[in-house]
């Protein structure tokens, strides 16, 4: 996705959206043991790690997707070898080895060509490798096999967003939201609206995101910028202050520093307005 950048007060403001986490090889470190265990076939031990992570963060798509694979194995929907190949592929992605991951996942596809989650993960690996046509094809196949697959719609939307095809991205995000609303979907819709200078709509979707994930510092930060670009300066400052509070709670020093850059400028301007200078 192209980030929207503005220069205000001599400081650059960036709507810093990230694609769905699997478009980057980096996985949350606390989930690595679960991926390792599942790749060794220790599914029940892995389940405990994924369930704990999902309880701590309801928007954790990796844990949710991993639990789906384990559940599908437990219910007999997929064979053990297919599940093992999928987790081995995820483990290789986490190790920043997407080419080897692709080989493993193609093996899983051969074992069960009709399993939609394999195609969804293959789409993400192809996206990592820059194979746009293959990525789009795999996401669409996942949706064909499972028409109400919200994650696949979301990933297809993220793919189109990364290609600069915002109208197609919005179409797929909206479909994903109609099936399974999430903070991440609404945030990405908001980023597109902001990128297209539709700040009123961006503000609406950032608020929808916060209803589902109230403590998201990044969303408050970007909401502050959206209000600023709408010339609603008091609301802008309020949301930067909220962002800073959540960054402080999370111990995010960079987030605090970035927010302080804007708050300091607000306070400087406020002082000038009061003194008439």
Image: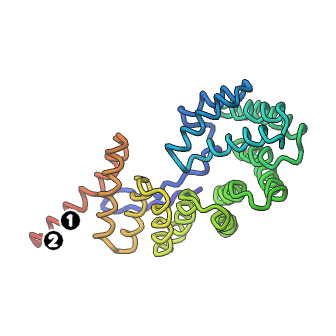
Residue 273 is tagged as 2
Q: Where does the image place residue 40, in percent across and percent down from the top left?
A: 72, 24
Q: Is residue 91 above or below residue 151?
A: above
Labelled pair 2, 1 in contact (Cβ < 8 Å)? yes
Q: Nearer the viewer, residue 5 or 194?
A: 194
Q: Position of residue 258 (x, y in %)?
A: 35, 49
Residue bearing mark 1: 269
Quadrant of the frame with the C terminus: bottom left
Which residue extends farthest left?
A: 275
Q: Please tell me whether residue 94 is drawn above or below residue 195 in the rendered image.
A: above
- Dot 1 falls on a residue whose secondary structure is helix
Q: Is residue 41 visible?
A: yes
Q: Quadrant of residue 251?
A: top left
- Residue 39: horizontal and vertical position, in percent? 72, 28
Furthest residue toward top: 40
Identify the residue at image location x=63%, y=65%.
Answer: 177
Report, in whole angstroms, how far the alpha carbon at label 2 lies from the one at label 1: 6 Å
């Amino acid at each position: 996705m192209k980030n929207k950048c503005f220069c205000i007060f001599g400081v650059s403001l960036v709507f810093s959206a990230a694609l769905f986490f699997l478009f980057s090889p980096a996985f949350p470190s606390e989930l690595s043991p679960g991926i390792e265990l599942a790749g060794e076939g220790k599914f029940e031990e892995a389940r405990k790690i994924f369930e704990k992570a999902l309880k701590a963060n309801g928007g954790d798509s990796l844990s949710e997707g991993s639990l789906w694979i384990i559940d599908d194995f437990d219910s007999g929907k997929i064979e053990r070898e297919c599940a093992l190949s999928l987790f081995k592929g995820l483990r290789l992605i986490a190790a920043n080895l997407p080419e080897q991951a692709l080989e493993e996942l193609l093996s899983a596809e051969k074992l069960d060509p009709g399993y939609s989650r394999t195609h969804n993960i293959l789409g993400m690996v192809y996206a990592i490798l820059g194979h746009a046509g293959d990525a789009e094809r795999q996401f669409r196949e996942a949706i064909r096999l499972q028409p109400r697959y919200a994650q696949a719609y979301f990933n297809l939307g993220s793919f189109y967003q990364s290609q600069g095809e915002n109208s197609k991205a919005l179409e797929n995000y909206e479909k994903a939201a109609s099936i399974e609303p999430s903070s991440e979907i609404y945030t990405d819709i908001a980023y597109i609206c902001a990128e297209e200078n539709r700040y009123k709509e961006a503000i609406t979707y950032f608020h929808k995101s916060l209803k589902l994930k109230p403590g998201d510092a990044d969303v408050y930060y970007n909401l502050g910028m959206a209000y600023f670009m709408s010339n609603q300066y008091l609301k802008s400052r309020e949301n930067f202050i909220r962002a800073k509070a959540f960054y402080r709670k999370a111990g995010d020093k960079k987030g605090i520093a970035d927010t302080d850059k804007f708050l300091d400028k607000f306070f400087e301007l406020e002082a000038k307005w009061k003194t008439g200078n």
